């Protein structure tokens, strides 16, 4: 029997637990012995590795976060600690490792793969930011979007009860995907993301006209990447003459009951990851694009820049016109 391990690295996402469940069940079905690594790459260094079984994944599919914890490991940047991690994998006779994470995690995975040729790695894009090149979808994005949708729908209730502008800051690190899709699907009046240049003055005449015509509140969604949430709120007060409030959505975007889509995507991603490893793929990432799942080289994923789909950008560029 061959041993296979899974770990989560970087920001957690809803859907990781569904992935863990599929990992244990599908590994066993394929004649592999599943192992969990607690705490991401930190746990790999600290030998926090243990055999997993059906009972470990019972009842976790509906929970956000990750049962096996995650970390952003700085120690892993050092070759000495990576050697320790590889020695630990060898001690447990682990031949395959599945890594749930973002591009930083895949870069780490690449280094391990280069240094420890006897272990094969497969990455599963997992970040609410949806900012990984080569894949149209990252695990956890749908749940995050639904959490944001719920929050903005609720904010609209109170915004419309007063006469106020709400400036809502969405996560996404350097990427505006979450903010853009949330603004569009929540009917926001303003959307500011780094991928689309903006000029607040271009909103001004239109907003003032709308107020004259009876509009009483505004919803603006801004990407955290722009770091201008307070400035935008002040702009509403000074230039549009409407009281404003700021809502930084923060880490609630990373939690919550995983949507059906994320649970299903978790199952597909893990299935492809394990199948790829068993077919002899040494170090690759499972990517999703319109026509299905594909294994891609880490260089084509972790070392390239993600671009938001042109159709979405086109919709987004209609803001402020
Ligand atoms: O990458 C996921 C993410 O939630 C980003 O959207 C955000 O900028 C960052 O992680 C927050 O990191 P932390 O959880 O370390 O505060």
Image (cartoon, rainbow, N blue to C red):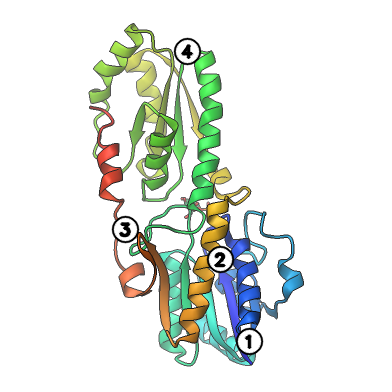
Residue 276, image x, y percentages: 46, 80
Give the side of residue 313 with respect to residue 107, left or right.
left
| Mark closest to the chain's N terminus, 1 or 2 | 1
Q: Nearer the viewer, mark 2 or mark 3?
A: 2
Are the two marked residues, 1 and 3, in contact with CB atoms closer than 8 angstroms? no
Q: Look at the numbered disc 4 and say if its residue's Cβ is closer than 8 Å to ligand 1.
A: no
Residue 182, image x, y percentages: 43, 38
Instruction: Pick the residue in front: 240 or 293.
Output: 293
Residue 151, image x, y percentages: 55, 34
Are the two marked residues, 1 and 2, in contact with CB atoms closer than 8 angstroms? no
Q: How far apart, in angstroms, are the residues tagged by discs 1 and 2?
A: 18 Å
* Vertical order, 232 against 278 (above or below): above
- When asked about the image quadrant of residue 289, the answer is bottom left
* Vertical order, 232 against 32 (above or below): above
- When asked about the image quadrant of residue 188, the answer is top left
| Mark closest to the chain's N terminus, 1 or 3 | 1
Question: What residue does disc 4 label?
Answer: 163
At mark 2, the secondary structure is helix
Q: How far apart, in angstroms, are the residues tagged by discs 4 and 1?
A: 62 Å
| Mark closest to the chain's N terminus, 2 or 3 | 2
Question: What residue does disc 3 label?
Answer: 306
Are the two marked residues, 4 and 3, in contact with CB atoms closer than 8 angstroms? no
| Mark closest to the chain's N terminus, 4 or 3 | 4
At mark 1, the secondary structure is loop
Question: What residue does disc 2 label?
Answer: 267
The residue positioned farthest toward the right in the image shown: 55
Question: What residue does disc 1 label?
Answer: 31
């Amino acid at each position: 029997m061959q041993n296979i391990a899974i770990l989560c690295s970087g920001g957690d996402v809803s859907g990781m637990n569904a992935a863990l469940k599929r990992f244990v069940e599908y590994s066993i079905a394929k004649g592999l012995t599943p192992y969990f690594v607690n705490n991401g790459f930190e746990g790999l260094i600290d030998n926090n590795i243990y055999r997993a079984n059906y009972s470990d994944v019972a009842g976790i599919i509906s929970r956000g976060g990750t049962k096996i914890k995650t970390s952003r490991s700085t120690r892993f940047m050092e070759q000495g600690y990576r050697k320790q991690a590889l020695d630990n994998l060898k001690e447990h006779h682990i031949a395959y490792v599945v890594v749930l994470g973002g591009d930083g995690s895949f870069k780490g995975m690449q280094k391990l793969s280069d240094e420890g040729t006897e272990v094969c790695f497969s990455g599963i894009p997992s970040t609410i930011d949806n900012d990984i090149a080569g894949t149209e979808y990252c695990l956890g994005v749908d749940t995050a979007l639904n959490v944001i949708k719920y929050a903005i729908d609720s904010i609209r209730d109170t915004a419309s009860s007063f006469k106020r502008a709400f400036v809502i800051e969405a996560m996404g690190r350097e990427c505006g995907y979450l903010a853009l899709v949330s603004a569009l699907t929540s009917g926001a009046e303003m959307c500011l993301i780094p991928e689309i240049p903006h000029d607040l003055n271009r909103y001004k005449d239109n907003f003032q006209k709308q107020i004259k015509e009876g509009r009483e509140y505004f919803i603006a969604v801004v990407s955290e990447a722009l770091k201008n949430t307070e400035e935008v709120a002040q702009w509403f007060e000074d230039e549009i003459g409407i009281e404003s409030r700021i809502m930084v959505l923060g880490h609630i975007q990373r939690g919550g009951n995983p949507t059906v889509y994320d649970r299903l995507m978790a199952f597909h991603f893990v299935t492809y990851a394990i199948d790829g490893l068993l077919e002899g793929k040494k170090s690759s990432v499972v990517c999703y694009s319109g026509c299905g799942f594909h294994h891609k080289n880490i260089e084509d994923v972790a070392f390239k820049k993600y671009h938001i789909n042109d159709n979405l950008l086109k919709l987004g560029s209609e803001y402020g016109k």
